Image: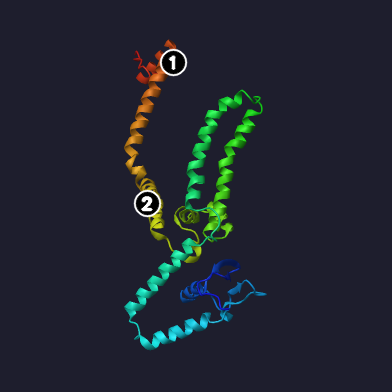
């Protein structure tokens, strides 16, 4: 007895990961969007002894090949504009499917933001208010050690979140070392902060990604530009201020010396300021 086309009995093994169940209608749709490779992907359903290449599923790729041939005969050759539109729709569908895929494990943008900014503030505020309570429980010599361990917890969780975030972006966790390299750390920070799951593969930011990218880069570039202006124009801009402060310092220093001098030292200083006295020579 032939099974209905819409019954979900098929499973697909793609890039070493199993997904399904799918109906034949679902598989035809995946073939149409080039999401199934007939040679590399494997297929299986209940009752089969082993997995088989997706290209050997009866009627799957043959039906699609015949449909494409019939479409070519019935429809004229598409124009460049029509092809561009179809390619755009295909890319949108692929991106939508990629974003909805559940295999992007790790920490998402929201989780990274929480562990990077929100959790440390909550933890340290709680630690500050809990310090007095711990004073009554722990001994004085144990309190600094315990507080130090508690204070380090957000940093450990942040390292863990960064490693899992790289996994979520489909990037190697070795990139964590790049956070200690100048300029590279800015680029990696942008990816961690703004990019969606699987970005290293599909290279699609999405609307939220563009918004977060602007939020990340705009203040950063502003601070860098301000720092460059201060580094170049700083000596000229603050020259008058420095000279004025120096004059005020010398004046205050002189007054302080006068207040701390003994009467003898004051008389001696006045005599030095007047210079040596001229004694007339008698003939």
Residue 203 appears anywhere in the view: no
Instruction: Report which residue position mark 2 lands on.
Output: 218
Residue located 62% across and 36% down the image: 149
| Of callouts 1 and 2, the N-terminal one | 2
Q: Return the residue nearer the eye: 86 or 197.
A: 86
Q: Quadrant of the N terminus?
A: bottom right
Residue located beneath label 1 in the image: 260
Is residue 155 visible to the viewer in this orientation of the structure? yes
Q: Is residue 29 above or below residue 253?
A: below
Front: mark 1 or 2 = 2
> In the visual, does 205 lie left or right of 106?
left
Per the image, label 2 sits on a secondary structure element best described as: helix
Residue at 49% in and 59% down: 197
The foreground one among 237 and 70 is 70
Residue lying farthest top?
263
> From the viewer's perspective, is 201 left or right of 145?
left
Picture disc at residue 34: none
């Amino acid at each position: 007895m032939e099974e209905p086309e819409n019954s979900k009995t098929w499973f697909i093994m793609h890039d070493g990961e199993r997904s399904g169940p799918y109906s034949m209608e679902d598989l035809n749709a995946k073939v149409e969007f080039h999401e199934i490779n007939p040679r590399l992907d494997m297929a299986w359903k209940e009752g089969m002894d082993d997995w088989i290449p997706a290209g050997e599923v009866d009627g799957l790729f043959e039906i699609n090949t015949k449909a494409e041939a019939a479409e070519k005969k019935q429809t004229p050759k598409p124009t460049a504009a029509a092809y561009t539109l179809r390619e755009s729709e295909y890319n949108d569908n692929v991106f939508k499917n990629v974003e909805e895929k559940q295999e992007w494990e790790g920490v998402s943008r929201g989780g990274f933001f929480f562990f990077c900014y929100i959790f440390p503030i909550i933890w340290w505020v709680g630690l500050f208010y809990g310090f007095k309570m711990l004073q009554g429980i722990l001994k004085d010599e144990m309190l600094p050690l315990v507080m130090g361990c508690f204070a380090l917890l957000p940093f450990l969780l942040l390292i863990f979140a960064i490693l899992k975030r790289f996994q979520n972006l489909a990037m190697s966790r070795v990139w964590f070392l790049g956070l200690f390299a100048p300029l590279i750390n800015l680029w990696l920070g942008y990816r961690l902060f703004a990019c969606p799951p699987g970005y290293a593969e599909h290279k699609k930011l999405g609307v939220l990604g563009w918004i977060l990218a602007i939020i990340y880069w705009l203040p950063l570039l502003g601070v860098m530009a301000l720092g460059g202006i201060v580094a170049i124009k700083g000596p000229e801009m603050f020259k008058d201020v420095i000279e004025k402060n120096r004059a005020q310092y010398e004046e205050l220093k002189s007054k302080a010396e006068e207040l701390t001098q003994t009467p003898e030292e004051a008389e001696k200083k006045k005599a030095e300021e007047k210079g040596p006295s001229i004694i007339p020579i008698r003939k």
